[in-house]
Image: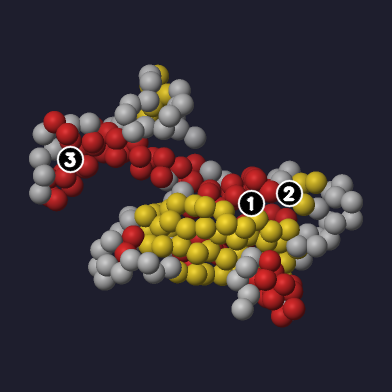
Amino acid sequence: MEDEANIVPGEPEDGDLIGTPAKIEVPDDVAEAVRTLIRWAGDDPAREGLLDTPKRVARAWKEYCAGYADDPSQHLSRVFEEVGGYDEIVLLKDIPFQSHCEHHMAPIIGKAHIAYLPRDHVVGISKLARVLHGFARRLQVQERLTAEVADCIWNGLKPQGVAVVVEASHACMTARGVRTPGVGMVTSRMMGVFRDDERSRKEVLSLMGLAR
């Protein structure tokens, strides 16, 4: 949660989040750091088109990294036990997310499939997406993101099994370095019955549309 001293009232500036009732006050040293980067890249931060860029970039990064102010496990604190005896797989497919690579701070854009096999209760399906976004809105590597989401659900819901598969494209590979567009990375973490029982693993992957 932002300290109230760092929040000032006002309308969102061009490019800021629409509907935000307040905007974050950008410290001078943060804005100057962005100006330094612009100069180092070869441009002039004093030219008209770049005058407001440092503050926009700073606010954008505060939004990109909003997950540092979030505790994803809290989204799993409210569960429902009256589910009519339902005891099959719960799956949320194709959840879009955006993150940033901790090595180059370049975008990671992808989707995740999150499944669990309940033991005696379920959680609202939107909470699974909130767990994903809570971890994705941090500087990340895809492998850790996948593990963090799965571990959070495993520890928070105590289900019989958890399966998380993440598919993403990394700008640090597609837009720089080897510059190879169209390459996707897939990571997975299987826990409980989805790890120990081959039939259960095949079933959840089939539901995700990933089984061959």
Instruction: State if disc 1 and disc 3 touch (CB < 8 Å).
Output: no
The image's mark for residue 203 is: none
In-image side of 156 versus 170 (left or right):
right
On the picture, is 8 further left or further right than 114? Answer: left
Identify which amino acid the numbered label 2 is placed on: Val
Question: Which is more toward the observer, 109 or 132?
Answer: 109
Which tag, 3 or 1, sits closer to the chain's start?
A: 3
The quarter of the displayed image where residue 178 is located: bottom left
- Is mark 2 in CB contact (under 8 Å) with mark 1? yes
Identify the residue shown where x is 76% and y is 46%.
79
Tag 3 near tag 2, CB within 8 Å: no
Q: Which mark is residue 123?
A: 2
Residue behind mark 1: 128
Q: Secondary structure at mark 2?
A: strand
Instruction: Give x and y (percent) for residue 187.
Output: 52, 69
Q: Is residue 54 visible?
A: yes
Q: Which residue is mark 3?
A: 35
Q: Position of residue 66 (x, y in %)?
A: 46, 42
Q: Amino acid at mark 1?
A: Leu
* Residue drawn at (60%, 71%) of the image: 210
Cα separation, mark 2 vs mark 1, equals 8 Å
The mark that comes first in sequence, 2 or 1, is: 2
Q: Could you tell which of marks 3 and 2 lies nearer the N-terminus?
A: 3
Q: Nearer the viewer, residue 49 or 137?
A: 49
